[in-house]
Image (spheres, rainbow, N blue to C red):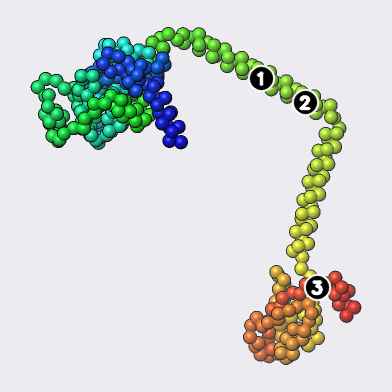
Amino acid sequence: MARLRAAAAARGRRHIAWLCGETVADLHCQPAAAWAPMLVVGREHYVESVQLYPGIPARELRKVLSQEIAAEPGVVAVPGPPGEERTTVRFFRLKPAALAAAAPYLWIVPETLALSAAVEGSFLQVERAGFRYYLAPDGTSQPEGGILRDARLQAMAMGVPPEPPRVLDDQVALGSLMWAGLWRLSPGHWTLLGNRGRQARWSAAVRWRPLAALAVGGLILYMTLASLYLGASLSAREQALEALGDDVSELLALRESLTDGAARLAALVALENTRQPSYPAWAMVAAIWEAGGTVAALQASDGRIAIRGTVVNAADVIDTLSQLPEVAGLRMDAPVRRTRTGESFAVVAELVEATSEDSGPAGRAGR
């Protein structure tokens, strides 16, 4: 996998043009490929400046910058991170020779922009082909010249601590760093680095009115064909239904009948599942009556029977009820209380699932 990535990176560097000195090469310092989508412009081919703008939203700032540089196709404006009060914007103004060389490319990338993205936070001294410049940690750069020919003085002039810079004098290593920096540029950067001169030429060369007429005509033709197809398919479906005739009506009636029957069956099954036998409750009531008692309340739900009543001797009746085969787990639901007519009791019992032989009145009559 590592070898595959290295091969892909080497192939990608061959398709990026680099204007350094008077020649256009790739990032391997070899002659550039016949087709390359972008041009990295060397520091000697543009003038760099920095301006401060009010801390407005990034989208609004881009609109302002696009209006300012609309008449200058050779200017690239790159805003820095938005600040609360101020936002720093770096302007790269291409020299005429660089602007002419950049005409065929889709993107124009200043060399220092890609390099600062690769070595963010470092103070660099870059040397190649007799040209030297300094790159500050904030991304600003300054070519060597005038009275500032010492790295320490250049650092002080650029607001950097006077420490020895990192020297980059290998052009191949410099190309590798720029390749890494290009990958670190955000999508917002690439929208700003487009070659506006090429875009303007392409826009002027395209005949928009015939294209618009062709698009509208194609849309109308598509809508017409779609309408004809839908109309034909609808007509064919109606004819097929008419050909079936009474068969369709019979099938629809049969489907409705099946649906109604399924609903009735589901209702009957639900009713059967919720039905509870009544003979266990009446067996308990009969035992209480036989003991000379009365039943005040009877409730059967969820497989459980609860009875409240009054008898002369509650203990004998409860013993009799506990021996009934229809119920199980008989227990007192309240304490026995003595009244003027006897003893008041309340019992609860669980229903027992009866078999087909002993279920119902017929089974009980046979015992």
Q: Could you give the CA–CA distance between mark 1 and mark 2, rounded to whole angstroms?
A: 17 Å
Indicate the secondary structure of the residue bearing disc 2: helix
Q: Do the residues labelled 3 and 2 touch (CB within 8 Å)?
A: no
Residue 237 as seen in the image, left or right of residue 78: right
Indicate the secondary structure of the residue bearing disc 3: loop
Residue at the image position 11 percent from the left and 20 percent from the top: 146
- In this picture, is 222 found above or below 251? above
Q: State the residue in front, 334 or 31.
A: 31
- Tag 1: amino acid: Ser
Crowd band around label 2 with a 10 angstrom C-alpha radius: few (<14), some (14–19), many (20+) = few
Residue occupied by mark 1 = 227
- In this picture, is 161 found above or below 199? below
Q: State the residue in front, 297 or 16.
A: 16
Crowd band around label 1 with a 10 angstrom C-alpha radius: few (<14), some (14–19), many (20+) = few
Crowd band around label 3 with a 10 angstrom C-alpha radius: few (<14), some (14–19), many (20+) = some
Residue occupied by mark 2 = 238
Q: State the residue in front, 298 or 177.
A: 177
Q: Could you give the CA–CA distance between mark 1 and mark 3, rounded to whole angstroms?
A: 70 Å
- Tag 2: amino acid: Glu
Indicate the secondary structure of the residue bearing disc 1: helix
Locate residue 345, reporting x and y percent. Answer: 68, 84
Among the two numbered marks 1 and 2 on one chain, the one whose residue lies closer to the N terminus: 1
Locate residue 339, reporting x and y percent. Answer: 67, 89
- Tag 3: amino acid: Ala
Residue occupied by mark 3 = 354
Question: What is the quadrant of residue 47 in the picture?
Answer: top left
